[in-house]
Amino acid sequence: MMYREYKPGPRLKEYVKCYYIYESNSETTFEDTVFPSGNMEIIFNLGSGQWQTAPNETFLANPAIELWGQIVKPLPVRSIGQNTMLGVRLYPQAAAFFLKEKVDLFNNQVADFSEVVDKAVQSLHSQLMDTGSWSKRIELLDNYLFGLLNDAGRRLQKIAVVNDVMQEMKQHDFFDNIENVAARYGITSRYLQKLFVQYTGLTPKLYSKIHRFQNSLRLVSQKESSLTSIAYDCGYFDQSHFIREFKSFTGYTPSGYSIESSPVTLALASN
């Protein structure tokens, strides 16, 4: 299994967190679980294998061009055969630049991206399949996404507010309530909630929880800190609060979780 990340060029660095390549050359079928990350993704399947997800306990084949909505609970996945993928990991608020629908409509599911945007993406998929160079593939994808930005128009200002609030909430010492945050931007907390859901698929509170969980997952995987220390460092009320929230996002307690048993998370962490 191979996983590599590539930074986008200057024109997309505010929207694309990274491009990534995932390749599995083994014919062995394996199952894993994907945890909430706070990011939406677009994935182009370029191999002969099949990737499946089970949002409702039954595994279903993913489309050739996947749109991953916000995952807010553990999502079982299955890899069959030799898979080759080119993915786009978007910043939480960035999906709204590329989609005309409200992004929360895609929560907890893997949609067919070709049914969400114009049919030109199918032509792009064919070009990616016919191109052997990864650098050329990323260039083609970069150009396509940049073209979609031209339709963002009136959404820009509203998304900018969401982005600014998110940057505040990611600070380690952030403890303000949503009412005070909204007041600083001259809007009501109810309107801020609406903007958040519309452009990220998450409420401010849920976004904050997922961001905190991802920090704790990294520390748990490193196996260098006690659960009490992790709970404190990540801003949980106490250890029991940390354990309860970690289990809600993974299905495991922190002490019962092992990154070695999660091929997908292990690949991400080793990059």
Image (cartoon, helix red, strand yellow):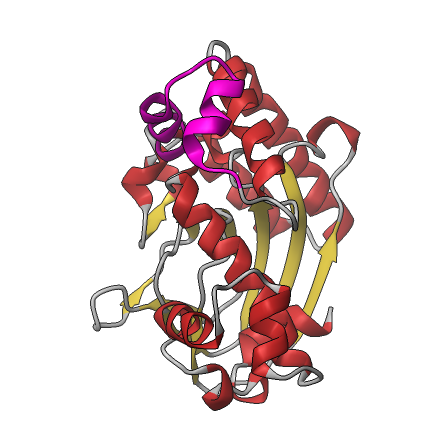
Residue 18: x, y in percent?
67, 48
Q: Is residue 129 above or below residue 27?
A: above
- Figure quadrant of residue 94: top right
Q: Is residue 18 above or below residue 253?
A: above
Q: Residue at x 59, y 63 (%)?
A: 234
* Quarter of the image that includes the N terminus: bottom right
* Quarter of the image that includes the C terminus: bottom right
Is residue 23 visible to us here?
no
Q: Nearer the viewer, residue 220 or 96?
A: 220
In the image, residue 73 lies in the stretch drawn in magenta: no
Q: Residue at x 47, y 19 (%)?
A: 183
* Main SS category, magenta section: helix
Q: Residue at x 37, y 19 (%)?
A: 188
- Figure quadrant of residue 247: bottom left
Left or right of 7 in this view: 175: left
Instruction: Check the image and name the residue furthest to the top.
Output: 154
How many numbered marks, from 0 up?
A: 0
Left or right of 95 in this view: 232: right
Q: Residue at x 69, y 31 (%)?
A: 12
Q: Which residues fall within the magenta stretch?
A: 176-198
- Figure quadrant of residue 252: bottom left
Q: Nearer the viewer, residue 123 or 158?
A: 158
Residue 17: x, y in percent?
65, 44
Is residue 131 visible to us here?
yes
Residue 84: x, y in percent?
57, 65
Residue 38: x, y in percent?
49, 50
Q: Nearer the viewer, residue 112 or 189?
A: 189
Left or right of 15 in this view: 156: left
Left or right of 54 in this view: 172: right
